[in-house]
Image (cartoon, rainbow, N blue to C red):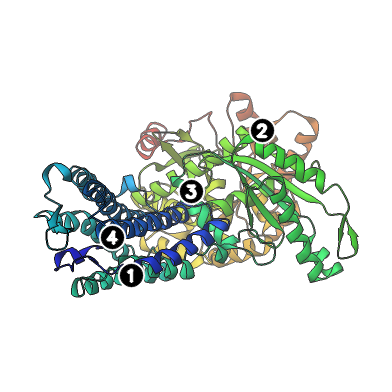
Amino acid sequence: MTLLSSFGALPTNLHVNYYFEVCSLIILAAITVAYFSRKKFPVSTYRLFGVGLVTLVVNVSLCILFCVLLDNSNVVHIGWVEAVAEIYFFMQIVESYLLYAFVLYAIGKSLRYSPLYLLTIIPSALGGIFLFTNCLHHLNFSFVYNSESGYFDFQPGPAFLMLYVVNWGMNFLATLIHTIVYRKVLPKELMRTLLCIMGIVLTAATIQTIQPNYIMSGLSFTLSAMFAVVTVCDPDIKVDRISKAFNNEAFIEYINVQRFEKQRKYYIIFDIESFGMFSEKFGLATANELVYRVRKYIQSVNKKAFIFRTTSSRFIVLLRNDKEQLEMVDAIRNRFNETLSIKGNNVKITVNMFYFVNEKVFYNSDLYNNFIARTLSVINFRDSNCVELGKDFMDRVNRDRKIKEILENCLRTGKGLYMVYQPIWDIKKKCFNHCEALIRLDNNELGYVGPGEFIPIAESFGLANDIDQFVLNETCAFMQRNPQIEILEVNVSCAEFFNNPSERFLKTINDYQIDPNRLCLEITETIAVKYPTKTREFMNDLGQHGIKFAMDDFGSGYSNMARFITLPFSIAKLDKSLLSEQLNVEIFFNAAINLFKSLNIPIVIEGVENEKQLEISKQKEIDYIQGYYFTKPLREEDLLEFLKNHK
């Protein structure tokens, strides 16, 4: 509250002491100039803070102007005084609303998504209309001519207090509620700053009420601005001290809030190749000078570009449009093809760079880190040091992100993921006494998504363990309901081997009271080759409890016979590619069959789809046959009907 002095008796001539306001305006103007003279961090909270500073300067200026005009109301038309007063009181409401907006964006919300939005914007809008029509009704305030002094006195109207309580008070209350409710979301330093600012404003209003001749609002605004700049709104705390680019903390904050920014984001990400070796060879001072020169050069190409240094050697350049992006790509590529002279050393560095348009590909630090890791694993910089990630690539990333979100929702709600079971024909017993459990994903938006697509995505986003647990729960419940199934084969993700899963597997099996001998875990040949030690530990831990293991897709990968022999596999599942009629494939197929038979290891052939493949499998005396020739994978109820009809 700024002009609570109006509630007390005002002295004649000099109505109020506004010298505090003059001093505050000088300091506030200096803070604002200093703030805008530095490059601001490109997020909504910093932009709102900048708008707030300008609004404060206008606010205090209007306060001083109003006081000056009132003190000279004997020569100034009272209409001008009233007009300035209306604008001034309205700016008070605007300032309180900006504080509320700042808190909302700081906690990662948008104004339009706030449940208190209507409770603040509607009263503020109505209050503004009520203020600017004051000349018609004078319910807010009026000016009464004092015949003794020859000046006009400010006279609050019957609605003046209500105007502040309903408008300024509502915004203040909404700000306080959000600060307290979302205290765990807000950084502690920011929360302390907000509470201190609100305390400063309330203290100033209280003092002004007790001493109505002194206007304290400008002082409270100035102290609040100084406190905010020193603690959380200083652009320098987001700047890397060596390169003078924005730092990694700044970039994380930026991508966490950019979900509210609708415009397209044009990115260039590049790394200085072998930066560690460069630092060792030329020394830390030369390396620091290099990153500073890199940032300085980029800024010289485009002064409006935002530059982040996220690791010792990685820079991210954020541009406004595709033209600026392509110009910057060419500038970086051309500049670092030349020899650089740094601290007396002539050096030539290599920069590996990729660029793209980010449209909802990542909007938090976890998604960004995953995007970078997957992108670097795909890009081959040996062919080119500059790669454009085109629309197809980014669409693929967007689809992966969408699938990740769908999987999270499925695991949370239990809907969308489900199991199907494919029966396996036992040639000797002439019955279907084995089944393989297979996970499926169906979504209203994307439709059917195959496990070959969503399982790698789940692994890359750290969801594989949750999916494996879902599969284990579902399959154990299935075996509990269907004791006639002798063996159920279940696929295991490679992510299992790094999370000590043995105890969890055994606990789940015991919880469902399943005989471990009925469970066969499938491990692909590729995983066995990639993680041999972990695979062996996993198999030994569970194998001693009777759980069987099958090498899945044998023949599709490395086909290392020795590795198969050294691991405790109970079943060999041959890939359908071995049913080819090519001579070399048939030779390998026969050799594999002879090996497994000599070791007394049962063989399952997968992917049998026609009569000819069935006959080949029978001729080679394979033990079990699985494939679409018999049936596609079935839901539980359909499987039971199938088994009933094929006894």
Q: Amino acid at mark 4?
A: Cys
Q: Are marks 1 and 3 in contact (CB under 8 Å)?
A: no
Which sits earlier in the primary sequence, circle 4 or circle 1?
Answer: 4
Q: Under tag 2, what secondary structure?
A: helix
Confirm or deny contact between disc 1 and disc 2 (CB under 8 A).
no
Q: Residue 415, located in which quarter of the rendered image?
A: top left
Residue plotted at (79% across, 41% down): 384
Q: Amino acid at mark 1?
A: Leu
Q: Earlier in the sequence, mark 1 or mark 3?
A: 1
Residue labelled with disc 4: 67
Q: Percent position (x, y) of residue 164?
A: 19, 57
Instruction: Locate the C terminus by quadrant.
Output: top left
Residue ID for mark 3: 258
Q: CA distance from mark 1 to mark 2?
A: 82 Å
Q: Residue drawn 66% across and 55% down?
A: 528
Label 3: element kind: helix
Q: Nearer the viewer, residue 49 or 315?
A: 49
On residue 619, the disc is 2
Numbered circles on residues, count: 4
Mark whose residue sits in front, 2 or 3: 3
